[in-house]
Image (cartoon, grey):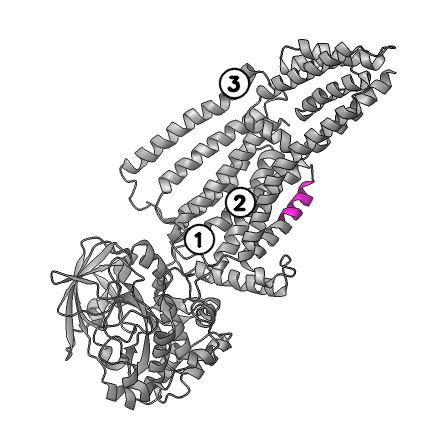
Amino acid sequence: MKGRSLWQVEVSLWLLTLLSVLTARRLFDSWEFAPLWLIMGLGGHASAAVTRRQRWPLAAAATASAVMLIIVEGLALYSDTLWLRLLPTAETLRQAAADVTAAWDAFGIVEAPTPATAGFLLVGGAVIWLAAFAADALALRARSVGQGLLPAFCVLAFVGALGTDAWRIRSAAAMVVCAAAFVAAHGIHHTGDRTPVGASDRRRATVPMRTALRLGIPAALVAALLVPLLPGSDAPAIVSWKDLDGSAPASRVTISPLVNAQGRLVGTSGAELFRVTADAPAYWRVSGLSRFDGTFWGSEQLYGDASRHLDGRTSDELLTQQVTIAALDSIWLPAAYEPVAYDGPEALYDPETGTLVTEHSSELESGMTYTVSSSVDVPSVAGLVAASGDVPADIAQKYLDLPDNFNRRVAGLAADITADASGPYAKALALQNFFLENFVYALRVPSGHDAERMEQFLFSERRGYCEQFAGTYAAMARAIGLPSRVAVGFTPGELIDGVYVVRGEHYHAWPEVWIAGRWVYFEPTPGRGAPGAVVYTGVAPQQVVPGDPEAAGEAGSGFIGELGLEDLEGLSGDLEGFVDVLDFEGSQAPTGSWSEWLVVPFYAVLAVGIGWLIIVPSAVRVRRALHHRRARHDARAAIGAAWDDVAETLFNLGIDRRTVETHAEFADRVDRRLRIDSGELRSLAAAAQEAAYAAEPPPPQTVTEARLDAQHLEARIRSARSRWDRIGTACRPSALTAGPRSRRRNRAVVNGRV
């Protein structure tokens, strides 16, 4: 095994794996996944490389790597459940199993780009680690260049099948360049045992690598530039692999638009999505989510022809909207709730949720225009107060449903908040006011609205964005017997020249509660308020400040309109001091999904690595100095120490003295192997042989010449090698024992000759 070429193979393979990890950005709405997955990729390669270099059997190496995988992921994601902050416990396994189950459920619902939930991080990190280990084993144990490329390109294929179209050509081109470098390095490593040291040989040895890069980089660049220009490159597939099962369900299962809320609010905040021409502002609703499985709010909606279901009935409060699509990438048609008439391209309609979608699953096209008339009458406070708590059976069955294992702590909090409220309206208002009084709006928090995230939001962080406010409110409402669902859409947008311009920053979610035979929306999100609803919510119309999604949102900022909390005191109950009862410690900055205990081992490994780079070469120098010090009064030993230094350097290059070789024979073989001017080596060999076998000790001049020959020879060998090759050789673990091993071999040769 040649050290230099082996490092080239390993580094090129590492780069290939790391690049495949970076392409996974097409799956997620942020880079939150990258630190853990990059560490997992490096960890998989490191465990494979160390065990391979130590000549561990594959089964033992795989077992050790799996143990390291479990420890690293435990430290990263579940540090608070570990025994001694290192080993997993039953609670660790329980949480991991719950996260994996949630990830599997989400896998069938969400659409890229999606938030990087704990389950996705866990499973994806394990896959990256195993792929890295497999790539190393296939490339360097099985010596198969094609199979070594397979794991990284499997990751790329998975991302290509499920990810967004962003960077798909450029990421593939970069993968091709790395693959070309790996193939060249792999070929150099396995083309014989010759170890060139001379400068000309070193240049010739890099020819395959340089040729591969000179051909691979231009080819990848040309492909990246020309492929998007080819006719049909952006056209739909002739045969869609997603439809090969021939299934054509009668109902259309839609993903939850709530899971992409943070991505829209942050990633596309300034992008214009659509425009609305209307006489009054409204919340432009896109969907109603009725099903909560403990992880996501979603729905399975049955759609029919909009022209047959929207009968154009009249209403006292009718709002007509003309909507023009700009860059809205969805299947839902925004409209004020509740649509009663529609005119435009063919669409489907779900009467239960009042949702309009495009036909044939096609996304909205830029420039598309349609007209919707909606009934927007506002319920009276008197009617809401007088409403009873009776709920129709069909409504209760669907809109009171919660998972059997719903968090009891969350349910108990909902009951405590509404304990002094009577009637469904008072309870709904009490929940709303609890959030507005005690929470703040913040986008830079972990995404999600599952049970674990909900508990963190309520009892620890007390900050979030509409996804947490709406999802948590609706779940708590169900826990106290209020039928509820989550509506997703947009706030009115910015009024410019009589037209409401709606951008990504206006994306919003809010809860709707069934009261008095109708759906009534409330607003628990600080800094947001629906037009017209102030008469019963006490929240004035308000929305995001243009260009600053987090400008509004201080605790209590929802009450800035004409009807405040004090006007509804008799209905909502007294919430003063409620925060103290719950022992809240004040708003805390979001910690994200990263554990602080991942930082400790990271810096520990970094410190050990830096220490290793310093300690190992220093230890070798000290060992050599002590060896020379012990030999300073003995001419034979002094020449032997000089010879041992050169023999150790050659030993690190993989050139060891055979037991049947004399010093001169060894020098001749080194000359043939390295093709260097071996005059100094032959002179040193002659001096060492004389010191070992001559009857009289060598004179001081011979000792001095031997030391100079050894120094010059080592300097020439070092200068003929690359800097990284020298560093790698000096810092490898075997460098600590190379000197003693080569001396033992030399003594064995001498004793055999004697």
Task: Examine the structure image and report whether residue 59 is included in the region drawn in magenta.
Answer: yes
Quadrant location of the N terminus in the rendered image: top right
Type of amino acid at the residue the image marks with label 3: Arg
Q: Which percent across, then down, holds residue 349?
A: 26, 68
Location of mark 2 (residue): 41
Type of amino acid at the residue the image marks with label 1: Glu
For the point 18% across and 73% down, the residue is: 311
Q: How crowded is mark 1: few (under 14 residues within 10 Å), some or many (20 or more)?
A: some
Location of mark 3 (residue): 203
Q: How crowded is mark 3: few (under 14 residues within 10 Å), some or many (20 or more)?
A: few
For the point 43% across and 34% down, the residue is: 176
Location of mark 1 (residue): 32
| For residue 685, above or below residue 255 | above
- Magenta-drawn segment: 57-66
Q: Is residue 373 left or right of residue 578?
A: left
Quadrant location of the C terminus in the rendered image: top right
Q: What element carries label 1?
A: loop
Type of amino acid at the residue the image marks with label 2: Gly
Tell which circle, 1 or 3, labels the residue nearer the N-terminal end: 1
Find the distance from the CA under tag 1 to the CA under tag 3: 42 Å
Q: Which of 113 and 248 is in front in this view?
A: 113
